[in-house]
């Protein structure tokens, strides 16, 4: 199965990055984009540097997106690019923003194109900093065609949209679905749950009848994006450029916390990261179900370095609703974004590269591991994955879930993953329940939001 089975999602691989960027001096040497004297009124809604369409563009990618750069070079040999590998701001490292701030102070050095594994960067990259020109070029004022922008899946560009304008293009969607091992479910005589309540009931039954088998995990920083987001927990409702509503004491938050606490206690949703040797050692062949993003297929299940589930066993079901709710919603775990620098001296080449890596089948269908954000590429990607005969079921639920991401969980400047990892993870390891930690989580979110200049409602 090409493209999906050996790739671990970059967002979770900061420790495996091939070439992390060093100090500011090294960074300046690696990049070559400078303002070079900018015009006050550019053609695309921002001040432009003097353009040189023959110049080499510098592209920053994470380890996994090196394949995107190679695909572009193969398809466009006449366009010169220089590829620099960095951590992609994995796990909320904030390296993208930190490095751009260094270049802002230096007045030069910005790369032409940057890939980020985070969905929160448009919130700062679209804004001026200390009077300096915003890093991100606005894309919907002519730099990227309307036809291209309209070709992205509904809602795919929401993380890129600030005050009505688009500042980045989405690489892939990371909608959460319910993965399950059809062979094991059939063997044990279990039916795929239709609600979260049934999911919890089945987890309780598994703990009793098949101890050692699991129905999910809760040891990664993106746990709230899988469970809390899918429960409409309003812990991260970004309502404006600098406004956020935080309510972790609601029924929606408490029911998700109680579910996790119940299943953690009986061992069917262990607090272990899916990217650890412990997970592979203890749970290979024992994952009955696992709610998680679309990219789990290649990063976890069909990956020889992880669970390595044989062909014909892995099934996928649509996101689960809570009892009494007409429609299920789901969370989003990553996805990745591409930015064009407003400082670029070769906007034409930068746009050409960014459009290629987000829309072209040469990368998004033939090479990319994740479900493309560009609708036409997504359709072709699904067809290709299904033709491999690896999956035990149709992949249609992944497509359906792409339009079910709840819009009450926003894309603010602060990283919810970093807050959860710092606040909840160690406390849970110390014996506390998630439900009793909800006020602590609330306070931690409020504190970080205020540090970043948000008005908290």
Image (tube, rainbow, N blue to C red):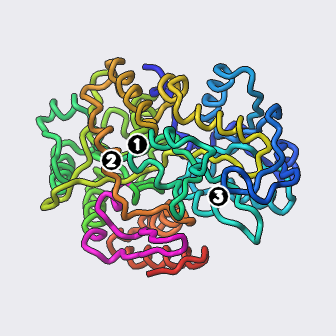
Crowding at label 3, few (<14), some or many (≥20) Cα neighbours within 10 Å? some
The image shows residue 220 at horizontal and vertical percentages of 46, 53
Contact, mark 2 vs mark 1 (Cβ under 8 Å):
yes
Residue under label 3, please give it. Answer: 94
Marks 2 and 1 sit apart, C-alpha to C-alpha, by: 8 Å
The image shows residue 229 at horizontal and vertical percentages of 35, 60
Please tell me which residue lies in front, 350 or 110. Answer: 350
Residue 403: give its label: 2
Residues in magenta? 226-254
Q: Earlier in the sequence, mark 3 or mark 1?
A: 3
Q: Is residue 42 shown left or right of residue 157?
A: right
**Can the viewer see residue 216 in this picture?**
yes
What secondary structure is found at the residue carrying circle 1?
A: loop
Contact, mark 3 vs mark 1 (Cβ under 8 Å):
no
For the point 12% across and 61% down, the residue is 324
Residue 202 covered by magenta stretch: no
Residue under label 1, please give it. Answer: 153
**Can the viewer see residue 421 in this picture?**
no
Q: Earlier in the sequence, mark 2 or mark 1?
A: 1
């Amino acid at each position: 199965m090409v493209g999906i089975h050996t790739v671990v999602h970059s967002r979770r691989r900061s420790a495996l990055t091939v070439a992390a960027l060093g100090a500011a001096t090294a960074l300046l040497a690696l990049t070559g984009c400078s303002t070079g004297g900018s015009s006050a009124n550019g053609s695309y809604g921002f001040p432009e540097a003097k353009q040189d369409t023959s110049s080499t563009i510098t592209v920053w990618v994470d380890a996994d997106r090196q394949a995107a750069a190679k695909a572009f070079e193969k398809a466009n040999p006449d366009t010169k690019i220089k590829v620099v590998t960095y951590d992609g701001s994995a796990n909320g490292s904030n390296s993208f923003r930190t490095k751009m701030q260094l270049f802002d102070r230096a007045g030069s050095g910005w790369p032409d194109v940057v890939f980020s594994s985070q969905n929160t960067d448009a919130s700062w990259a679209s804004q001026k900093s200390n009077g300096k020109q915003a890093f991100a070029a606005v894309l919907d004022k002519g730099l990227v065609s309307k036809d291209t922008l309209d070709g992205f899946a509904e809602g795919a560009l929401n993380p890129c949209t600030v005050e009505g304008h688009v500042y980045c293009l989405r690489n892939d969607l990371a909608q959460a679905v319910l993965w399950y091992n059809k062979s094991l479910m059939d063997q044990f005589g279990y039916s795929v749950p239709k609600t979260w309540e049934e999911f919890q009931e089945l987890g309780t039954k598994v703990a009793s009848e098949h101890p050692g088998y699991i129905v999910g995990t809760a040891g990664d920083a993106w746990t709230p994006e899988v469970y809390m987001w899918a429960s409409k927990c309003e812990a991260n409702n970004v309502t404006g450029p600098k406004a956020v509503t935080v309510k972790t004491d609601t029924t929606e938050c408490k029911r998700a916390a109680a579910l996790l606490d119940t299943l953690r206690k009986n061992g069917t949703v262990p607090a272990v990261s899916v990217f650890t040797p412990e997970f592979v050692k203890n749970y290979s062949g024992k994952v009955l179900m696992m709610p998680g993003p679309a990219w789990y297929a290649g990063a976890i299940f069909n990956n020889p370095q992880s669970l390595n589930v044989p062909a014909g066993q892995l099934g996928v079901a649509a996101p689960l609703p809570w009892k009494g709710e007409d429609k299920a919603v789901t969370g989003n775990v990553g996805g990745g974004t591409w930015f064009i620098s407003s400082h670029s001296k070769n906007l034409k080449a930068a746009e050409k590269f960014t459009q290629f890596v987000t829309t072209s089948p040469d990368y998004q269908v033939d090479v990319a591991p994740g479900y493309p954000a560009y609708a036409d590429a997504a359709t072709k990607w699904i067809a290709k994955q299904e033709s491999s005969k690896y999956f035990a079921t149709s992949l249609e639920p992944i497509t359906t879930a792409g339009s079910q991401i709840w819009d009450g969980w926003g894309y603010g400047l602060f990283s919810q993953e970093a807050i959860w990892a710092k606040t909840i993870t160690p406390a849970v390891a110390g014996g506390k329940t998630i439900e009793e930690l909800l006020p602590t989580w609330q306070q931690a979110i409020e504190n970080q939001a205020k540090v970043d200049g948000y008005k908290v409602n």
